[in-house]
Image (cartoon, helix red, strand yellow):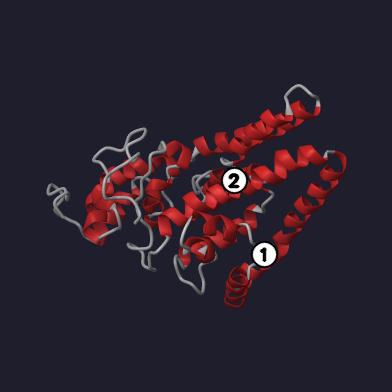
């Protein structure tokens, strides 16, 4: 507790929540720009490659990089950040969420349904949809499992959640049509543009899915148990946090999902004493100020 800010006298849950609410409720325009921007890059690259203006190998590299940014805007939409929680702007969450996920060939509604269950049951082996690619031994196992959407473990959790929550089942069934459309689109494009489809869609989405599973799930959650203040860790590596989507501070998101991604650093600065008081994994290692790349490497904060 040596790092605890002694100027804060009230470390109660009520004081913590009151402070956290001051960081909630804005429209996260940054995510709207990233979501529409990365899709524009993806689509433009397709056009330029097919027209012969950009070589296929270069287009593939560009698409892989842009696809790695395809999930985060949808994630923001899943939590209502794109609309700022305003009912008259809810369409923004869905519209941007669907568009940004096209390179990943995923349904925004299905990912929203499973992700909210992940929040409700984080690290629960029976109910967390992410459990089987999170609680593994290494990055390779995580990458392998997250690309296996039909594994016995994952299907078993989805079936259990469907039995418990009819609305969850309804969402999965209705949104499966979107997944089927992507499946057909991949086949049709592969007939006319086989190499382009392989190198501009299929391989990039697989690589991006592996990357997203590692930084969104494995690093923040592996080896931890269920519990609001103990299910997510702060972690570090030598890569600038921008390229990890700042998932090093993913603990803040699980603590208060309504705080926008780009507001999390300031929220952590303010809430750090409460995090340390609650015993959140790695909280004692975070700096007093979170700037562009503060979590590159901090001794003691790494997993393992």
Q: Image check: 31 left or right of 107?
A: left
Residue 249 x/y as whole percent: 37, 47
Vertical side of 139 occupied by 131: above or below: below
The Cα–Cα distance between marks 1 and 2, rounded to whole angstroms, is 23 Å
- Tag in front: 1 or 2: 2
Whether residue 151 can be seen here: yes
Q: Image check: 290 left or right of 90?
A: left
Mark 2: few/some/many CA within 10 Å (<14, 14-19, 20+) = many
Residue 62 x/y as whole percent: 63, 32
Foreground of the two, 289 or 267: 289
Q: Which residue is drawn at 67% across and 28% down?
A: 58
Vertical side of 32 occupied by 225: above or below: below
Residue 130 x/y as whole percent: 52, 62
Q: Residue at x 82, y 49 (%)?
A: 187
Per the image, label 1 sits on a secondary structure element best described as: helix
Q: Which residue lies furthest to the right in this view?
A: 192
Identify residue for label 1: 172
Per the image, label 2 sits on a secondary structure element best described as: helix
Numbered mark located on residue 133 in the image: none
């Amino acid at each position: 507790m040596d790092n605890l800010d002694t100027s804060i006298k009230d470390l109660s849950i009520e004081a913590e929540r009151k402070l956290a609410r001051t960081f909630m409720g804005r429209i996260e325009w940054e995510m709207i720009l990233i979501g529409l921007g990365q899709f524009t890059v993806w689509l433009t690259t397709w056009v330029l490659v097919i027209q012969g203006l950009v070589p296929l190998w270069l287009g593939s590299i560009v698409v892989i990089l842009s696809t790695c940014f395809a999930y985060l805007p949808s994630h923001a939409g899943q939590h209502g950040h794109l609309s700022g929680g305003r009912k008259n702007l809810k369409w923004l969450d869905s519209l941007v969420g669907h568009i940004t996920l096209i390179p990943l060939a995923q349904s925004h509604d299905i990912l929203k349904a499973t992700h909210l269950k992940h929040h409700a049951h984080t690290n629960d082996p029976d109910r967390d949809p992410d459990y089987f690619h999170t609680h593994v031994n290494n990055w390779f196992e995580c990458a392998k499992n997250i690309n296996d959407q039909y594994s016995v473990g994952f299907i078993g959790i989805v079936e259990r959640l469907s039995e418990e929550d009819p609305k969850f089942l309804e969402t999965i069934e209705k949104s499966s049509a979107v997944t089927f459309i992507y499946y057909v689109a991949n086949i049709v494009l592969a007939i006319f543009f086989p190499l382009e489809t392989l190198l501009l869609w299929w391989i990039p989405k697989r690589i991006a899915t592996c990357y997203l599973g590692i930084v969104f799930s494995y690093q923040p959650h592996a080896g931890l148990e269920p519990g609001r203040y103990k299910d997510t860790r702060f972690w570090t590596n030598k890569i600038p946090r921008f390229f990890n989507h700042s998932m090093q501070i993913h603990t803040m998101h699980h603590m208060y999902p309504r705080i926008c991604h780009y507001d999390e650093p300031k929220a952590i600065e303010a809430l750090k004493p409460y995090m340390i008081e609650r015993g959140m994994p790695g909280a004692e290692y975070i700096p007093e100020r979170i700037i562009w790349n503060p979590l590159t490497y901090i001794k003691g904060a790494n997993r393992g």
